[in-house]
Image (cartoon, rainbow, N blue to C red):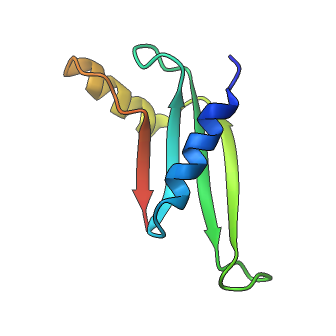
Amino acid sequence: MKVSRKDIISAIEILQSADNIHTVSYFCGNLNNIKMRIRLTRRKYSFHRKPESNEFLITIGKPNSRERDYIKLCKKAKSKPKRYWLKFI
């Protein structure tokens, strides 16, 4: 399954919207049958960088076990999962 550029851009916009967001897991495709996700992680205050700089790590692949459990719980409750999942600092 291909990942569209719109999905990556919207995940980056979510991550840049607030400083206290550490990770964004953005689910791609149909929300009833999720097969791919984009995970963006903020790498802040790395050893060689200035404190103002931000690095983003992009990972594209299948959902991990926590994300799969979240999707299963949403299916069990007969509701669609959100398009994104946030992890705060």
Outermost residue, right side? 48
Residue 35 higher or lower than 66, as above or below? above
Residue that appears at 52% across and 38% down: 26
Residue that appears at 19% across and 22% down: 77
Determine the image quadrant of residue 50.
Answer: bottom right
Q: Position of residue 68 (x, y in %)?
A: 43, 30
In the picture, measured across the screen, residue 54 lies left or right of residue 78, that is: right
Residue that appears at 44% across and 39% down: 84
Residue that appears at 60% across and 62% down: 42
In the picture, measured across the screen, residue 66 lies left or right of residue 24, that is: left
Residue 41 higher or lower than 43, as above or below? above
- Count the marks: how many? 0
In the picture, measured across the screen, residue 37 lies left or right of residue 2, that is: left
Q: Position of residue 2 (x, y in %)?
A: 71, 20
Q: Position of residue 46 (x, y in %)?
A: 70, 78
User: In which quadrant will I find the C terminus?
Assistant: bottom left
Outermost residue, left side? 77
